[in-house]
Image (cartoon, helix red, strand yellow):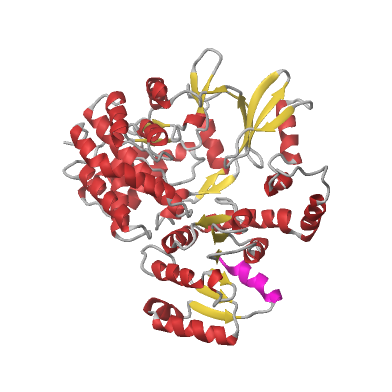
Amino acid sequence: MILFAGRPTDSRKGLPLFLEAVTILTTLSGLSAFAIWIVGGSPGEIRHISHLINRLSPLRELHRQGRLQLWGRVENVALAELYSRASVTVVPSHREEFGIVAVEAMMCGCPVVAAKTGGLEDIVIEGQTGALFEPDDALGLAATITAYLRNPQQHDIHGKAARARAMRCFSKSETLALVAQLYETNHRRPDQSFDQVTSNRNQILSHERLSRIKALVGEDEISVSPATNGRHPVFCLKAGGKQFIAKFFTPRFSLQASLFPDTASLSVERGGLISYYRELYNRENPLAPPIRFLEEAGEPLIVTDWMESLAEVSDENLDDAIRGALSQCQSHLPLADCAELAEYDDTLKRVAESPDLSRIHQFDLASAKLNARMTGARLIQCRTHPQIELLRLQILFSENTWPLPTEFRTRVDQIIGLLLANQEIVSGTPKLAHGDPKPEHLLVDSAGKIFIADFEHSRYTIGPCDLALWFSFTGVRGSLGANASRVCERICKLCDSPEERYLGACWVVSEVIFFAVHRFTCGDRRELQVTQNFLRDLPMVLVRNEIIR
């Protein structure tokens, strides 16, 4: 259920843009059935909107099926039920001084997809209570809606956070207190932002969390401060003359489930116990910081040694050191012959013989079983083979799974076709990968040894997955000057064999496309453009460096 609330003929509210996005949704594959509720407007306005809808074939068909309903003006007391039933509330305004509809929806536990304009940017927290898209971008609006339609858990987690934020920041008592603070000149500095005034909005260090940390380390006199602003609450703490890092594992939703259709056979759960179990699986990994304390009950908690960050060191100077460290990770806990490995090999062969989504899904299930040893037996989607990921993307692009710009589709089709043409699917035993070797995860102890934090994305993969992710994080994503030649030079330098170089290129391409599409479904076109620029020069670079022959 997708909800629009507002005066439908008010040009500022963006109903025509919303209807354009709905029309785009009707052209996409792999979406669950959805309905549209348009709430607001006088009887005269409803007649005008009905006339418009009946002149546009896709909307007329939705209306005929009863999937597009015009409610007109409703009593305020009835709005709460409509918001509560919606999967997402859309606020596509071209101009919005505040955005009361967004606040009302969040109060009712409904995530909000809103245009980046006016007060909406202050109300909706990107990736926590909903999504923000660029104004007047129908493709971007449609893309953000698809993620909620494909993954109910994304709605559940964002909806819960939306209600909590609305109650903290916009309830009557909180609002009156903030108004009073505006007149207390000694309380608020003129340069303080709204979020600084309401700095308790995240409740990141709750009394319960602080009490658990004290009990776990066995010290009552401790110093605790937030360490990061990531998905999981992380704290620096000093206790007994020592420094530690404490990390709580909160539930989150699966990015794959929000992007890919037909993932029903696999769990959409992430974070929480799954992340905790992955950390425990890698407890003896030579790259993992030593775990000093841990607690599974409630919100899982792990306390590790505190180490210095390597984030300030240039990426290129770290390449050789990273290769050595990641090689240690690959050699840790090698897979032995087992039924899960045999099933993995068998489904891989079947995909190689006749690639289609049905066989790729069977391979996904086999990969999930292979990796269940580190996820607490939960079967989750694990991207384990770069060629299979390219095949998946190739098929999903051809089936119009996402509302992507034509030029991006063209470049993706070209580079995937080039990488897969006349290439056999590489077999072999998957090796352990960290799964998220970002620069900010790199640590060093007093002896200069490199460690990598956060093994919560670890999985068994084929080829140099971690190196490719490192190249992606440090040479493509987030960089408007992404240089295909430099990335390929790094692949050739750090990957020893032609097969490793080829698989490394496949991993880089599959990952940058995956994250570009993911960010687009969050309303952010920037990474889409970065990836498109990177793919422009890549075909010639791959041929020139003989990564493909």
Q: Specify whether residue 300 is painted magenta.
A: no
* Percent position of residue 178, x then y: 78, 53
Q: Is residue 20 left or right of residue 122?
A: left
* Percent position of residue 298, x then y: 66, 42
Quarter occupied by residue 221: top right
User: In terms of secondary structure, what is the magenta stretch mainly?
Assistant: helix
Q: Is residue 172 left or right of residue 150?
A: right
Residue at 41% in and 43% down: 382
Q: Is residue 514 left or right of residue 446?
A: left
Q: Which residues are magenta?
A: 76-87
Question: Can residue 78 be seen in this snapshot?
Answer: yes
Residue at 70% in and 24% down: 238
Quarter occupied by residue 426: top left
Q: Is residue 445 above or below residue 199?
A: above
- Pick the residue in front: 306 or 126: 126
Residue at 73% in and 46% down: 197
* Percent position of residue 361, x then y: 35, 52
Q: Specify whether residue 77 is painted magenta.
A: yes
- Pick the residue in front: 400 or 174: 174
Question: Can residue 342 be seen in this snapshot?
Answer: no
